[in-house]
């Protein structure tokens, strides 16, 4: 199959593309290599993907419809994994319009082209942020609250857009809601990476709030496993949580990094942003039932794998 992966130079997109290439699919990767964080992280991932003869890369922006049309015309794409997005709650506060444009209009561009070029499946990366401060654990059937940040707003809007478009275009569509993904090649703006780097380099780490807020940290391998399950047997439109079902307090993350590195952290405390929720916690009953999927690695073992990678690749 020829599979399109948007955001292929991003953390999750890279791992997904690599898994699909290992399965002997042809992967058409799209990324605009923006500077949301250091571009070197993205070019390093691309170099790994370019070792595969079945990988084809297009530097393109999902807001540029003409660029996308050329790519869809050039390849017989059967499946679209749409992971390209502007991510992160704090950055979205500074650039709310950019987040709406990329995460909503970009998604619309890809879905309409998928219909025009007879794509068989459309899979979309959403976020646990859409749940806000819902009662835990978060279940896919919950009525979503008023979004707590521009990022959450953009993901809610993209999900609603897909549901509306699906009513007319009928492309089999799966919305995956990711929960705090971490692991090798992880994003440098997320806590597991930031805290590991700070402790290993004897630099202060910034703690927003008192550290009791918790995140449902999910190891990257299980996210990719969920994404690459056979979705052809699912209903025409599904929304599925991919999380660990085990919220980890930020203070526990810090202690875990200290234990695995054998070093003490230097903590600089700041006030927690009101846009950030107290806890994320995935109900994964639907993923178990429909995909026969369940994460098994412990947080300690997952962080051990990440820290080993960091020492080998980033020190």
Image (cartoon, grey):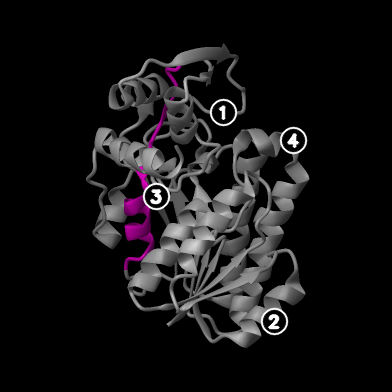
Q: Nearer the viewer, mark 3 or mark 4?
A: 4
Q: Residue at x 36, y 75 (%)?
A: 232
- Contact between marks 4 and 2 (CB within 8 A): the answer is no
Question: For numbered disc 4, what is the local secondary structure?
Answer: helix
Q: Nearer the viewer, mark 1 or mark 4?
A: 4
Residue assigned mark 2:
70
* Image coordinates for residue 58, horizontal then vertical, percent: 63, 72
Of mark 1 and mark 4, the one earlier in the sequence is: 4
Q: Position of residue 272 (x, y in %)?
A: 58, 19
Q: Image quarter for residue 189?
A: top right
* Sequence-earlier tag: 3 or 2: 2
Real-space Cα separation, disc 1 to disc 4, in angstroms: 14 Å
The tag earlier along the polypeptide, 3 or 4, is 4
C-alpha distance separating marks 1 and 2: 39 Å
In 3D space, how far apart are the residues under numbered discs 4 and 2 (Cα atoms)? Answer: 32 Å
Say whether residue 213 is magenta: yes
User: Circle 3: is it few (<14), some (14-19), or many (20+) Cα within 10 Å?
Assistant: many
- CA distance separating discs 3 and 4: 28 Å
Magenta stretch contains residue 227: yes
Q: How many marks?
A: 4
Left or right of residue 166: residue 283: left
Whole-percent x and y of residue 11? Answer: 49, 52
Query: Of helix, strand and loop, which one carries label 2?
Result: helix
310 and 124: which one is in front?
310
Task: Give the residues in magenta.
Answer: 211-229
Q: Which residue is mark 4?
A: 94
N-term mark: 4 or 2 = 2
The residue beneath circle 3 is 241
């Amino acid at each position: 199959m020829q599979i399109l992966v948007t955001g292929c130079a991003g953390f999750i997109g890279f791992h997904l593309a690599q898994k699909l290439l290992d399965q002997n699919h042809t992967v058409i990767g799209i990324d605009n290599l923006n500077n949301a964080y250091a571009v070197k992280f993205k070019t390093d991932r691309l170099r790994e993907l370019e070792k595969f003869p079945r990988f084809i890369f297009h530097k393109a922006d999902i807001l540029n419809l003409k660029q996308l049309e050329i790519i869809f015309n050039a390849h017989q794409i059967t499946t679209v994994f749409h992971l390209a997005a502007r991510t992160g709650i704090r950055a979205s506060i500074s650039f709310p319009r950019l987040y709406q444009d990329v995460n909503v209009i970009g998604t619309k561009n890809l879905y309409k082209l998928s219909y025009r070029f007879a794509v068989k499946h459309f899979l979309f990366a959403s976020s646990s942020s859409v749940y806000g401060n819902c009662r835990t654990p978060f279940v896919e059937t919950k009525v979503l609250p008023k979004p707590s940040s521009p990022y959450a707003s953009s993901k809610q809007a993209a999900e609603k857009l897909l549901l509306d478009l699906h009513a007319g275009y009928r492309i089999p569509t799966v919305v995956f809601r990711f929960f705090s993904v971490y692991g090798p090649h992880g994003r440098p703006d997320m806590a597991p990476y930031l805290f590991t780097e700070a402790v290993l380099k004897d630099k202060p780490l910034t703690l927003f709030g008192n550290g009791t807020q918790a995140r449902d940290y999910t190891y990257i391998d299980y996210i990719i496993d969920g994404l690459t399950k056979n979705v052809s047997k699912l209903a025409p439109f599904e929304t599925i949580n991919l999380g660990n079902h085990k919220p980890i307090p930020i203070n526990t993350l810090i202690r875990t990094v200290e234990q695995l590195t054998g070093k003490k952290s230097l903590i600089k405390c700041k006030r927690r942003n009101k846009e950030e929720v107290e806890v994320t916690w995935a109900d994964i009953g639907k993923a178990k039932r429909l995909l026969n999927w369940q994460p098994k690695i412990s947080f300690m073992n997952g962080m051990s794998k990440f820290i080993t990678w960091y020492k080998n690749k980033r020190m």
